[in-house]
Amino acid sequence: MGASVVTAVGSGIGLYYLEKNSAHANMEADGLHPPSYPFPQKKLFGTFDHASIRRGFQVFKEVCSACHSLDLVYWRNLVGVAYSEDEVRVMAEEFEYTDGPNDNGEMFERPGKLTDPIPRPYANEEAARAANAGALPPDLSLITKARHGGVDYIYALLTGYCDPPAGVEIREGLNYNPYFPGGSIAMAQNIFDGVVEFEDGTPNTASQITKDVVTFLNWAAEPELDDRKKIGTKAILLFSILTAISLWVKRNRWHTLKSRKIAFNPPSNWKKPNGPPSTKH
Amino acid sequence: MVGGFTRSLSSFVYRNFFKKESVYFTTVVASGVAFSITFNTMFDRYWDRKTAGTKWEDIKGDYVAN
């Protein structure tokens, strides 16, 4: 029996290892697996670095918002997270929003308010595709949750542009990126050393810029992360204590029953049976 | 001490807190409230110490004109 268990478990482990480390001719279609970067919010009890979120929003505004929308994030979402209310008001007022109709039935333009969404670069998908040679820059509000690999994938993608290996032809207009499934991505590299100047003096290397914008995008997709981890830690702590108490109370209430002894005092006219029944057949 | 032979702390607790349902219920609710306040205050202080320097509250001093 031991040999069959070992065979079953061993082959299970072996097949799992082979599946995880499989090599096949079409691995380019999956995209290169990104490494695991030490983002603080990835740890079990880790939370966001809000200074990084602030820098990341600056990067998004100056570099990414030219092509990518962030429809699900509103100016008010930034208040108390990366900017003060006054700062956000000033930033929102830089943009024009269509509002109305007014009393004459006309739509009019007005400066942005806290309740407005982060402005879109293109009015609709068709305009976006027309301006980008047929490719649609995806909305980035949920991108770290919407891509396998999450923050690691986005970081690797943004920093992973390189020359294609020998023999690989990339169509005119596309760029080679090993992390992108298929290898040919429409977006060119946009993040280089010094492309953004940080107001808090953080050195603006390409990796720092990418790290900050990825942290910002992670916040945009999971704004509740800080609270979720805090409440979750409290819950784990409380439920562990309550479980320990429950186990003790159960064993305490049951111990009389579990340690009782049953004694058999035969009556005086008890006829002893013929002995224990035979087990041999 | 309350009248009656107090054999132990558990006897005292039983006679004064567990026998009458009204007292029992009040004790449970009151200790729940007290535990909740204490636990939350202590945990929040620990959590704020653990995440010091990363939250908006920690960096807003540089950006808010007070």
Image (tube, helix red, strand yellow):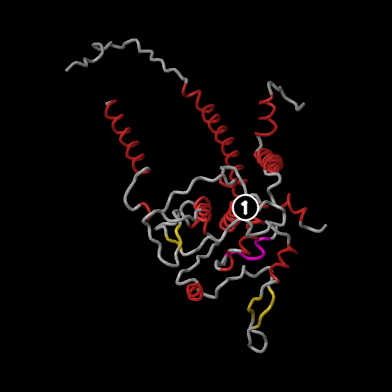
| Residue indicated by mark 1 | A205
**Left or right: residue B21 compared with residue A186:** right
Report in which chain the residue with disc 1 lies. A
Residue A35 in the image, given as x and y percentages of width and height: 49, 46
**Left or right: residue A134 compared with residue A227:** left
What's the residue at 52%, 27% (across, down)? A251
Residue type for callout 1: Thr
Q: Quadrant of residue A173?
A: bottom left
Magenta stretch in the rendered image: A72-78
Q: Outermost residue toward the left? A: A281
In the image, A203 versus A153, the foreground residue is: A203
**Left or right: residue A98 compared with residue A167:** right
Residue A27 in the image, given as x and y percentages of width and height: 36, 51
On screen, residue A122 above or below A35: below
Q: Outermost residue toward the bottom? A: A104
Q: Is residue B22 visible?
A: no
In the image, A234 versus A75, the foreground residue is: A75
Quadrant of the snapshot with the C terminus of chain A: top left
- Element at label 1: loop
In the image, A214 versus A44, the foreground residue is: A214
Quadrant of the snapshot with the N terminus of chain A: top left
On screen, residue A176 above or below A1: below
On screen, residue A204 above or below A235: below
What's the residue at 51%, 74% (across, down)? A131
What's the residue at 63%, 64% (across, down)? A62
Residue A91 in the image, given as x and y percentages of width and height: 70, 67
Magenta stretch holds residue A48: no
In the image, A151 versus B19, the foreground residue is: A151
What's the residue at 73%, 60% (across, down)? A84
Q: Residues within 10 Å of mark 1 (few under 14, many from 20)?
A: some
Q: Quadrant of residue A18?
A: top left
Q: Is residue A246 visible?
A: yes
